[in-house]
Amino acid sequence: MYKIQTFNQISERGLERLPSQQYQVGPDVSDADAILLRSHKLDAEAIGEGLKAVARAGAGTNNVPVATCTEKGVVVFNTPGANANAVKELVLCGLLLASRGIIRGINFASTQSDITDYAELAKLMEQEKKKFKGSEIAGKTLGVIGLGAIGSMVAEMAIGQGMKVLGYDPALSVDAAWRLPSKVKRKESIAALIASSDFISLHLPVLDSTRGLINKEMFDAMGEGTCLVNFARDEIVDSEALLEALESGNLSKYVSDFPRPELMGRDDVISMPHIGASTSEAEENCAIMGADQLMDFLENGNIKNSVNFPNLSLDRAENAAEGTRLAICNRNVPNMLGQILSLLADQNINVIDMINKSRDDIAYNLIDLEVAPSADTVSSILNIDDVIKVTQL
């Protein structure tokens, strides 16, 4: 029986993926094999010795102590793309809200409740509508910084709205490049993209390299009247530089999913309460993807969409007996695989199939054996220097 502890309200559609006869799932589960969560802030103390995986039902993992998990051989999953459509739609909303007098117009209309005569109300609306005049986004240039699952969908959406689209992503994967519409013109630097864009949309994770990325230098590179849209992470934008750009008028509008106290009440700021992925469809998609990834990992050792381990998968032989697969995590140092295979050979255990990959300082191995190893053999592998975790599947 696998044990999964949940935090937050996880969609039932996702939890239903985990067969009740094999999985004990819930917030009160103790000594869990895995954790499934959304935005709950997970402390490092929660990463126990028996924990094997953490799945974040969402793209960002800044609420998970990833470094601690890596040190203890715990795989951290996210669900990239599962909430992409929800965020994409809200980006479109943000572009329209920034371009048109929609919010001010709604606020004006809603304050006229004391007028009971239809003709009088209609006349007033016609007289005052010029105050809320805006501009169309068609024909404008959108710069998309970060061209992953969400960024590529935003780019495609903008093209469909008649916008010109520029893109920048120094870490663009092959898969992401295939998804990217051919009409997107890639820029070689953020500054070049910013200088040529009417709107800029951010779609980056929070890393040491992206924290405060949109700083004074970047704001200075913007043309007058630029609008910045941030449905990625608050920390990507330097707060002091942002306020200075708004005060100077160099930045005409800031649309954000992350309200800041110093920006409240400003006409040039549109703040939303972190609702980019708050749709029933997105929550279901994230929960389903997270549950499926945990299930495949716990049962087969396969890894997909990990933020700290290499992605790899090994099909099981149809006649493979239970307990004949080893999942081994070790530090990425020379001769580790040689030591493991040598130990198995000394026990006269034949290797049928295997796969090995590394990511930064961590290596991960799946090894299928002809017979199940003894507990002493598994213990001997675990005792090899720089082996972190061994799981028999």
Image (cartoon, rainbow, N blue to C red):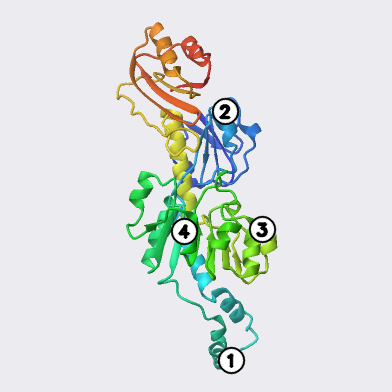
Q: Which residue is mark 1?
A: 117
326 left or right of 117?
Answer: left
Q: Nearer the viewer, mark 4 or mark 1?
A: 4
Q: Which of the two discs, 4 and 1, labels the residue nearer the N terminus?
A: 1
Task: State the separation of the CA atoms marked 1 and 2.
Answer: 70 Å
**Of the pair 237 and 131, the residue shown nearer to us:** 237
Q: Nearer the viewer, mark 3 or mark 1?
A: 3
Q: Is residue 90 visible?
A: no
Q: Which residue is mark 4?
A: 192
Q: Which residue is mark 3?
A: 240
Task: State the separation of the CA atoms marked 3 and 4.
Answer: 22 Å
The amino acid beneath tag 4 is Ala
Return the x and y of residue 73 as percentages of the image width and height: 53, 27
**Circles 1 and 2: CB atoms closer than 8 Å:** no
**Of the pair 333 and 39, the residue shown nearer to us:** 333
The amino acid beneath tag 2 is Glu
Task: State the separation of the CA atoms marked 3 and 2.
Answer: 35 Å
Q: Is residue 10 visible?
A: yes
Q: Quadrant of the C terminus?
A: top left
Q: Secondary structure at mark 3?
A: helix
Return the x and y of residue 171 as percentages of the image width and height: 44, 45
Q: Nearer the viewer, mark 3 or mark 2?
A: 3
Q: Secondary structure at mark 4?
A: helix
Q: Which of the two discs, 2 and 4, labels the residue nearer the N terminus?
A: 2
Q: Secondary structure at mark 1?
A: loop
The amino acid beneath tag 3 is Glu
Q: Which mark is residue 71?
A: 2
